[in-house]
Image: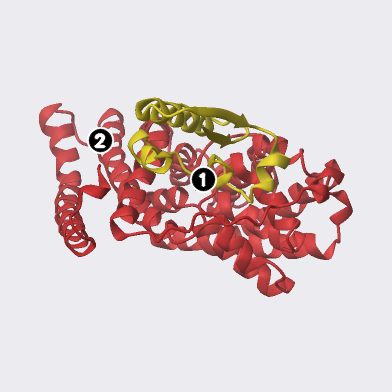
Chain colours: A yellow, B red
Amino acid sequence: MKTLQVLGTGCAKCTKLAENTEAAAKELGIEYNLVKITDLTVIMSFGVMMTPALAVDGTVKVVGKVLDVAELKKLLV
Amino acid sequence: MNVDSAPSPQVSMRRYLMLGGAGLIVWWGIYHGLAPFADWFTYRLLALTQGTRLASAIAFFVYEVPKVLMLLTLVVFFVGIVRSFFTPERTRRVLAGRRESVGNVLAALLGIVTPFCSCSAVPLFIGFVTTGVPLGVTFSFLISAPMVNEVALVLLFGLFGWKVAALYLGSGLAIAILSGWVIGRLHMEHYIEGWVTAVQLGDAELPTETVSWAQRFHYGAEAVRDIVGRVWLYVILGIGVGAGIHGYVPEDFMASFMGKDAWWSVPLAVIIGIPMYSNAAGIVPIVQALLEKGAALGTVLAFMMAVIALSLPEMIILRKVLKPQLIATFIGVVGLGILFVGYLFNFIF
């Protein structure tokens, strides 16, 4: 079970990253729990200043950009 | 584009360089064919008479639209590659604990090359001020980042030439440096919303993957897709309006109310510019047409800076972290700087 946390205050790019992450996880067929974190205080506690960002099992893997599904799959395996 | 299918970094580097070189030659060829093409299109294909209003408007539009879009694509691509070397995190580390004056200059310069979007203004602001970047230095960054941007510079260069672009770059940086310094001197730290200081910027390791050149090219291409994809319509609309003014508004029409002799035109331009929200892509072609019809350079530059640097949506976003007094000071100081630049250029030219 992987915990996928998409950090973002609700901008268009954040939604896109969440969608791509979900698609990547489904394609890999892994068990996952995707959470969108919109609370700025929590986002900042990850050390992230540029949204969107993605944390996998609590570790920040992507900052400030939207990766496509293929790139995300590599981060999730 | 699949970056990882490349067999080795060296091969992929060479491949990208060759592709880039070939692309540049094609770009150059097309770029120099644009003026003859616009003439051919207007006077041969449409068979319009030279010197008529319609012909002049159409020739302007057919030449300027592809020219500006091509310049934009090229510059955004290279700026994208340059930006792949910078992150807000790295910029924050450079600025943390800097002395003010030096910090203001560095912050304004880094504002040009650090990837920034106004949607990240709040986390960036908090991240900066809670980790020892002085408030004024933070403001220098926040002023420079939107105002001195590659889209504005390309359009100014394309439509006015390098001198005006350089003036804009120089005065934009000066405003960012000085405004930030003044805000720092005013010691307004207690006008930051209380909850901000409670936020802890985590110091977890962020991914610092070594970026290959293939990825940097990829990043540049992404920037083109993102930025040009967002502004192309504004460029066309702006040049369309500009072409209309170019062809149909009489010479010296603007001189009476946006000319040099109308002293009140500069403050008026700033006041009208602040609530207006347009990106540089839409505003510059209109500004160019105004200038051509007798408006003074300082006045139109002031208008453009006020539109780009002081936008209402950004103020609303920043209101989350700044108390009204600090926002008002921010608008006041930057507005005064723009006013000064406007008068200065009207005086010089």
Q: Residue furthest right?
A: B190
User: x, y (%) of residue A28?
Assistant: 36, 30
Tell me if I can see residue B242 in this picture.
no
Numbered circles on residues, count = 2
Q: CA distance from mark 2 to mark 1?
A: 37 Å
Task: Find residue B62 and name its label.
Answer: 2
In the image, B168 versus A77, the foreground residue is: A77
Q: Is residue A4 left or right of residue B218?
A: right
Identify the residue at horizontal 43%, vertical 58% (top origin): B209
Residue designated by label 1: A64
Residue that appears at 41% across and 41% down: B227
The residue under label 2 is which amino acid type?
Val
Horizontal relation, residue A11 to residue B124: left or right: left
Vertical order, B144 against A46 (above or below)? below
Residue B316 to residue B177: above or below:
above
Outermost residue on the front side: it is: A1
Q: Quadrant of residue B122?
A: top right
Residue type, mark 1 in image: Gly
Q: Secondary structure at mark 2?
A: helix
Residue B173 pos. (x, y %) = 58, 62
Taking the view exactly as shown, the residue that stands out farthest to the left is B44
In this rendered view, identify the residue nearer to me: B12 or B92.
B12
To which chain does the residue with label 1 belong?
A
> Residue B126: x and y, percent?
72, 50
Q: Residues within 10 Å of mark 2 (few under 14, many from 20)?
A: many
